[in-house]
Amino acid sequence: MSGASPVVHIVDDDPSFLVALGRLLKASGYAVKTYASAADFLANLGDAAGCVITDLRMPGMDGLDLQQALVRGANPLPVVFLTGEGDIPTTVRAMRQGAEDFLTKRAPKGDILAAVDRAIACDAQRRAEEARLHALQARFETLTSRELGVLRHVVAGRLNKQIAVDLGINERTVKLHRTAITTKLQVRSVAELTRLAQAAGLFDERPTFPKGQ
Amino acid sequence: MNWITITWPMVAAACLTLGLVELGIGLAQKHLRAARLLFSLGAFAIAASAGVELALVHVGTIPNAELLLGARRVTHSVIIAALTGFVWFYYGTGNKRLALTVIFLCLIGLVVGVVSGQLSPYTLSVTGLRSVEVIGGVTITLIDRVFNPWNTSLYFAALAAIVFVVDASVRLWRCGGRQRALVIGGSITFFILAASVHTALVSRGLVHTPNMVSWVYLSILVAMAIELNADVLGAVRLAGQLKESERRMDLASAAANLGLWAWNMVDDTIWATSRARVLFGFSESERIDFARFQSALHPEDREAMERSVESALSSGHGYEAEYRVCLPEGQVRWLAARGQVEHDAKGKPIRMRGVVIDVTARRGDEFELQQLRSQLAHASRVSMLGQLASALAHELSQPLGAILRNTEAAELFLEHEPPDLDELRAILADIRHDDQRAGGVIDRLRALLKRRSFAPQALSVNDELANVAALARSDSATRKVALEINAAPDLPPVMGDPVHLQQVLLNLILNAMDAVEDEAVARRKVRVSARRNGEDEIEVAVEDSGVGIAPERLVRLFEPFFTTKANGMGIGLSISRTIVEAHGGHLWAENNAVAGATFRFTLPLAGAATPS
């Protein structure tokens, strides 16, 4: 969880409902921002934590469009859908795209607050994981490219001798690199090293190494 | 008994009869009264003259002969004066001086006649009497006379009368009364001449016959009577024809179930045929005036009827009205009346005349048809709102949701110490506003769902457009159709039924949205516009950006049960057209130059023609 308190973003083309829901959430102790349209919201979206409550039916960009844009963007806040009336196809589509919750506009207050809390918690969790990953990736970034090359072979379970042959270097040099890796990453065993590398998303199918922001 | 004692009394009787007949007619009617009275005076004088002539035939002594000759002069004076006067009055033209001359000479003749006999030695002329046998072996008395200038005045009177009559006849001939001039002028001239010549001959003893002047005058009298009574005879013929045409009219009106009526406005009486009386429920002998007529009408229809009468009186055009009549047995009958106003010489309306017919059956059919139409329209509205159901539920849940959230927020604010009263006030105001919003949706729905008949009123097209847009907006958002409403500001009101008008608008808008549904989102456009078209109508256009309408469908589009939609009933457009036409407008479709189709309809302004 980042330092700022989470913000609940409400998007609805109906000004009356927008104000009313804003009031309720503010009175319930949330930081609230309201937007009259999806475009307005996306234009003003920072990287703050929180969640989005949006009307499903809106002229122009509707709730599902908003969700899609959000998923593709840099700050994929969880989305809670509110709608006047739910029909099955839209609900299914929304859930498939990972809607946090799907509620009617006249759902009980408890349900809405619970959904908001869940969404915020979900966002917080995602952010925490992201932060951990970033920290991990930062640790791997201290390694030189030669050390990274050795690490790839170690994680793949190859012996020092095999690594030396593959990389065309001395077996002793391989040992030195391994010592440097374990020191820099502060791990004690190969098993731990493998787990860390996996958690950092190293050497999976992705062709390029993610550079930290 | 001989032919003389038989024929002279017959002449006298004929003259008396003619005189009495004309006297009767002359006293009874104004037309030609003076001419008829003079005619009868002349006729009586001729009858008297015939009597005198008969007495002269058998006269025995000279003094008696003088006396009878005097009487004859008196009658002849009267006859000539009466004939002259008759011509004067009957022609209506003539030379006044000549007429006065005739009268003056006749007066002299009259005086001479009266003083004849023993009274005046100056007028004596008889010198002797002798008996002669004439035709038929009858013996008559001939009177030998000497010339006496006093007795010549009558010849001059006759001469002056002939001149007067010829002059008057020429005048009349020139004015166009050719037949009268010829018959009367000709006969009087001829017969007076003949009578004068005959008298002169008999008086001089040149011809041995009785005096036959009365015969001659009878001929004139007959010619005059025929001419004078040609009008009367014509009137009799006319009366016959009139009766015949009245009978035909009765037959025709009975066959057509028509009642005839005439309203005399001067004394406020209404004449009505027995058929008309039956239609209104009046008894056969009852006196009808306008108030009585009004009282027979259905109270709701009285005002409209009065307006029709007033407009007929003020405009001078025909009178037309349809109204219900409440019969004594509690039945209601629809009557249609048509009439014309008649004016006096000053242009003041004095009478109204017309027909009335029972239209209950037609009205009943119309009523049934209207019922059916309104049921169908209702069914179509319900089906249309069914399409909108989900959009409308959304429309309703917005304000209801807002009210709920505001209430919950208010509860939380109340727990604060102290509670934020400003915020609470704002919340309450918002709740009220949202409640009204939800109520508006429900009202609109209820109005459209209600079964109702056509009830026109002055309304603003823009208001109805706004109402319909409110219903369709949410649906258009879901279907991602850009719905644009372009109403010209300050459109004058139209005469119409708001619900039916909304139905037409909604039908056209929903159709347009269906038409663009398969287009790419950016191209889904429906534009509704209203503008004034010319002096007396408003045109509303619903334009879509779809693929347009195939030409062969364009003509069938408004047929009932013609549909191109999988789940359409095919009644929407046909009902819309019926509704628009009931408003006095037109609804048609056309393809756009670029893309899509446009449905247009017109509505007459409230001040223009009234919808049927």
Image: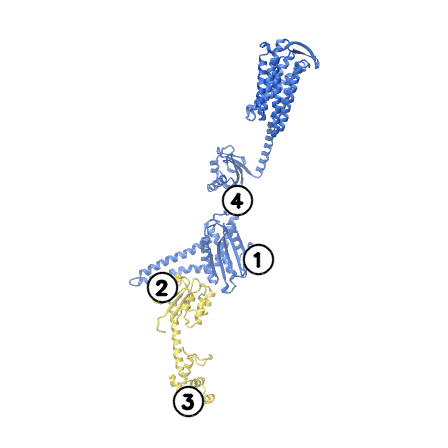
The quadrant where residue B162 appears: top right
State the hue of chain B.
blue
What kind of residue is marked 1? Answer: Arg
Residue shown at 44% from the left, 89% from the top: A160
The residue that label 4 is drawn on is B363
List the residue tagged with mark 3. A175
The residue under label 2 is A24
Marks 2,1: beta carbons within 8 A: no
* Dot label at residue B110: none
The residue positioned 44% from the left and 72% from the top of the image is A72
Q: Which chain contains the residue that carries disc 4?
A: B
Up-down: is A56 above or below B194? below
Could you give the CA–CA distance between mark 2 and mark 1, rounded to whole angstroms?
55 Å
How far apart in space, not on screen, are marks 4 and 3 (Cα)? 111 Å
Q: Are marks 2 and 4 in contact (CB under 8 Å)?
A: no
Q: Are marks 2 and 3 in contact (CB under 8 Å)?
A: no
Residue B176 image offset from top left, x and y in percent: 61, 30
Please give the letter of the chain rendered in yellow.
A
